[in-house]
Structure formats: structure tokens, C-alpha cells
Amino acid sequence: MHSIPSVRTYILVWLTLTVMTFVTYLVAQVELGAWNIVVALLIAFFKMMLVILFFMNAKAESPLTKLFAGAGFFWMILLLGQTLLDYISRTWMPEGKMW
Amino acid sequence: MADTHGTVAEHAGHSQLRHHFDNMEQQFESATLGMWVFLLTEIMFFGGMFCAYTVYRSSYPEAFASTSQHMNPLWGAVNTAVLIVSSLSMALAVRAARLGQQKALQILLIVTIFFGLCFLGVKAIEYHEHWVDMKVPLIGGHWDYHEEPQFARQAQIMFCFYFFMTGFHAIHMVVGVGIMLTIFMMARKGIFSSAYFTPVEISGLYWHFVDIVWIFLFPLLYLIGRTKKIL
């Protein structure tokens, strides 16, 4: 079926994930203003991609399975994007109130 | 395997091949695709909670930062590391199953179960700390937010998100441990081989998904408002 990744690959991915956990823990203590949440989410996204591509071996899946996995991202972008578009843009109105 | 109308299946000739599939490859692809479809429903389930969390956090940023001081980020970090190790052992278990290494498969499944239970143990310690700390909303007599009373109401919202999100995640962990025990029992019977390891593979997908949910929960719940002026 698929080619089998080496144990070394898995160990390297695990090491990277563990290091990134430390990094996100440390960066959270540094004052970066609004960038704190951006950095935290970027690191989380990076860790997620490592898990999906290597541990879940999505690289080797069939094109149809990849399409379905990608649909998950599409759904989250729709859900978060449309919702935030609403809440953020409410304050743009002249008499805007959040609720 | 009773095969009444499948000459194709007979030619493919594996005892685990169901008669409605042409061959083992097709059966494997179908199961994997089906698992991803299930994971999509899980993304919708957790996605709704993440979305609601985002809306309320952007509405009450100070209150959420105040509430996060009552989480222990060290426990959160330890549990993240524990889950990542369990994901590693799970990935190696799938690899062992593929290579037909029966002994390694069983050991790695036990390791995965062990770290899954470690995670739940730490979570139980944390819940107990919140209970003693009077930080459990919705349950009469276990809510007190005298530290920063101006946030007392919004803090209840944040703690509800905390308990619902980590709680549903923990339920998924309990289910995951149950699945791994089942897979372990199947492995002991010698059902899996390099030609048939589909249940190990798709259970692994579930396990990694639950890991990913925690990868996002950790920074979003534990690491808000912890900055000190360094730069």
C-alpha cells in the first residue's frame, strides 16, 4: 500500500512537537501585545500540520481522502471567518454596539 | 468468510476481505476515507465550541485573561507533552502493524494507553484543584471569584468554556483508551498482519485528532495574560 516512514522520521517529528510546546509556553510569558495570540496560534497550526502530515500520514492518502481532509480546513475558515466578520464589523456602524 | 457471489474476492484471497470490496487496497482506502468523514463531523463539533470561545474572548479579553490565571500552565504543558508522546507511540504502533511486528504492536498500544491514562490523571488533579479553589460555575456553592470581583460574571463564561471544552476532550480520551484496549485485544488474537491493519490505522487517526484538539486548547485556555514586561 503506502510507503512506510522510518522510525527516525517519527522521532524527529515528536522532538519538533515537544520543542514547539516549550516554545509556545515560553513565548506566552513575553509581552508581545496582540502578537501573543498570533504567535500561539501559528505554533499550534504548525504542530497540527506536523501531526496530520506525518503521524496521520495524510501525505500518502488517496486524493479523495486528501480532499475530505482539506474540507475540514475549508469548514473552519467559513465558520470562524463569517462569524468574526459579523462581530468585528458591528462596531464599524455609526451607532455600533457589540451586542 | 462467507462469500456467496464474489469471485474477485476469492482471487484476492484474504480472510479479512469483505465481499463488497474488490481487494484489500480498496477496502483500506474506503475505511480511511470513512474515518476522515467521521473526523470532519468531529471538527464541526469542536469547531462550534472554538468559534463561540473566540467570540466571547474578543468581547471580554480582560476577564478571560484574569480567569486564565487560575489555570496551571505547567500541568497544561505537561499534559501536552504526554499527549504528544502518546501520539508518537500510536504512530509507531501503526508502523509496527504494517510491518507485521506483533510483539512491538502490542507493547506500543499499551504505551499509548498508559500515556492516555496519565493525561486523564493530570486532568483529574486539575479539576480537583478547581473544585477546591471554588472555580466551578453552574454547581451551587462551588463558585467564588473574590480575587477580581469586577470580572466575576464574565469569568463564569470562561470557566464554562474551559469545563465544556476540556470535558468533551477528556470524554474523547476515555473513548480513545477504550478503542485502544479493543485494538490491543484484537492484536493479541493475531488478527493484524502487514496485509490487514485497517482497524489500527483508523483508530490511530482518531487518537491523533484528539491530540490536535488539545494542541489548540492548551494555548487558548492556559496561556492567556501571562506576559511579564521583558522587552
Image (cartoon, coloured by chain):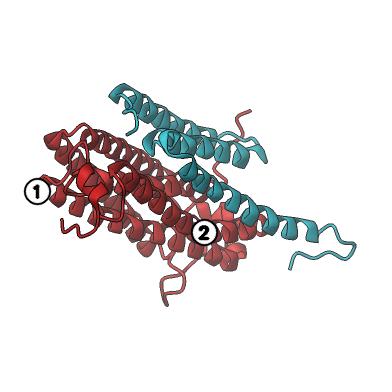
Chain colours: A cyan, B red
Q: Chain of mark 2?
A: B
- Between marks 2 and 1, how big is the CA–CA gap? 36 Å
Residue at left 54%, top 45%? Answer: A70
**Is disc 1 on the same chain as disc 2?**
yes
Work out which residue is located at the far bottom of the displayed protein and give it.
B140
Q: Is residue B180 left or right of residue B224?
A: left
User: Of label 2 and label 1, which has the lower sequence position?
Assistant: 2
In the image as oriented, which residue stretches furthest toward the top?
A8
Which residue is under mark 2?
Answer: B44
Above or below — where is A77 with respect to B228?
Answer: below
Mark 2 residue element:
helix
Residue A19: name its quadrant: top left
Q: Position of residue B130 (x, y in %)?
A: 39, 60
User: In the rendering, which numbered label is found on residue B189?
Assistant: 1
Q: Residue A61 falls in which quadrant of the image?
A: top left
Q: Are marks 2 and 1 in contact (CB under 8 Å)?
A: no
Report the mark closest to the observer, 2 or 1.
Answer: 1
**Mark 2 closeness class: few <14, some 14–19, many ≥20 residues within 10 Å:** some
Q: Amino acid at mark 1?
A: Lys
Q: Secondary structure at mark 1?
A: loop
The N terminus of chain B lies in quadrant: bottom left
Residue B81 in sight from this viewpoint: yes
Judge by depth and name the residue closer to the eye, B197 or A23. B197
